Amino acid sequence: MKTDSAITKDNTKNLSEVAGALKGLERAAVTTHVGADGDAIGSSAAMLRLLEKLGVEAVFCHSEAVPNYLRWLIPEAVAEIPSGYELIALDTSRADRTGVRIPESGAAINIDHHADNPEYAKTNYVDGEAAATAEIVARLYVELGVELDKEAAEAVYTGINTDTGGFRFRNISPETHELAAELLRAGVVPAEVDDRINRTGTLEQLRVVGTTLANAERYGEVLIATVDNKDYEKTGGSELDSKEAIDALRTVAGVDVVAHLRQVPKGTKGSLRSELFDVQEVAQGFGGGGHRLAAGFTREGLTPEEAKQELLEALRGRVDLGDSPNGAEKEGK
């Protein structure tokens, strides 16, 4: 630290105090949540750029590899926090989901847009109304008087674009669109960013997404797709590849809740989406969390089929599951 005063816990959402904490750093390790997505890496890349301009020595510290489609933003990570580096956690709703273990001294700064974040760092800024954590990082550029150059703007744009479904979800505000306009003025070309994010797929990814969609079953207003180890073996795709299926599930008319349940070594990971229903509450019941209309969870020791039955029980009486004996209405049946 550049000063002798310790960072004290701050839950006031005062951006100027977060900015002051950043300026007080000499060395920082930036991390995000496990299973990093576009906002996780985009906000981290923008933060690394901001710290560089503040004269802070910074590294991206994460035990997992950066996803292939995002390595143009952050090519690589170090697996452990270097000695003497303060930890900054971005877009991570819980301390147990950080990409590296939080040291005994605690995380220095926690910046997030998940409303259920318990504010686990010494200095916290959590804004559940922000469209993406990258949007909050952009505010810090303004607060600190640092120019958002093209490199930083592309990182922020990636975070916002991916966490809003290409500016389609309900978490978009007028301020988000105004920020997007500023990012374009800084040099962002949306078509180029889209190519880097979305035109990096493989045939195996296409096959596992197709299989996931073929496995989808409708239960009244609920649509659930599962994918397991047999599907990965058959298609050559992976669990991460199959995640692309959830956006297609959202396109079915008359469905309010969609779920994507995919097998992982520990059990089943679930992603939930809705336009109106509070899926965050459901995810929290399974030890997960997220946003009101977009949430996730992991069920250790359960197959996707077992997790599906558990999820249906959690939804029973809260969402229309249909009139057939088991609540199912398979498409085309």
Image (cartoon, rainbow, N blue to C red):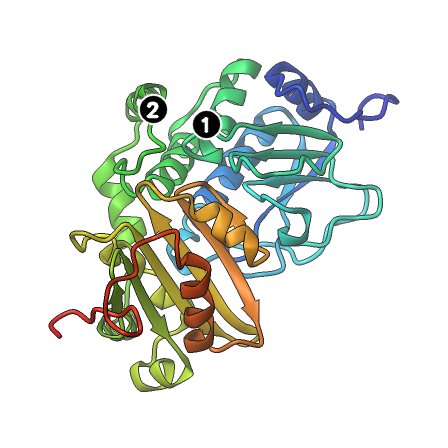
Residue 128, position in %: x, y?
A: 50, 31
Which sits in the foreground, 205 or 152? Answer: 205
Q: Is residue 74 visible?
A: no
- Which residue is pictured at 67% across the width and 17% down the height? 17
Q: Earlier in the sequence, mark 2 or mark 1?
A: 1
Name the quadrant of the C terminus: bottom left
Q: Amino acid at mark 1?
A: Glu
Q: What residue lies at 31% left-to-right and 73% top-to-bottom?
A: 326
Left or right relative to 51: residue 307: left
* Residues at circles 2 and 1 in contact by the CB criterion of under 8 Å: yes
State which quarter of the image contains the N terminus: top right
Q: How many numbered marks appear?
A: 2
The crowding category of the residue bearing disc 1, from other C-alpha atoms within 10 Å (few below 14, some 14 to 19, many at least 20), is few
For the point 66% across and 38% down, the residue is 118
| Label annotation for residue 45 | none
The residue wearing badge 1 is 129
Q: Could you tell whether 52 is left or right of 128 in the image?
A: right
Q: Which mark is residue 173?
A: 2
Relative image position of residue 178 (x, y in whole percent): 31, 19
- Of all residues, the one furthest to the left in this rendering is 332
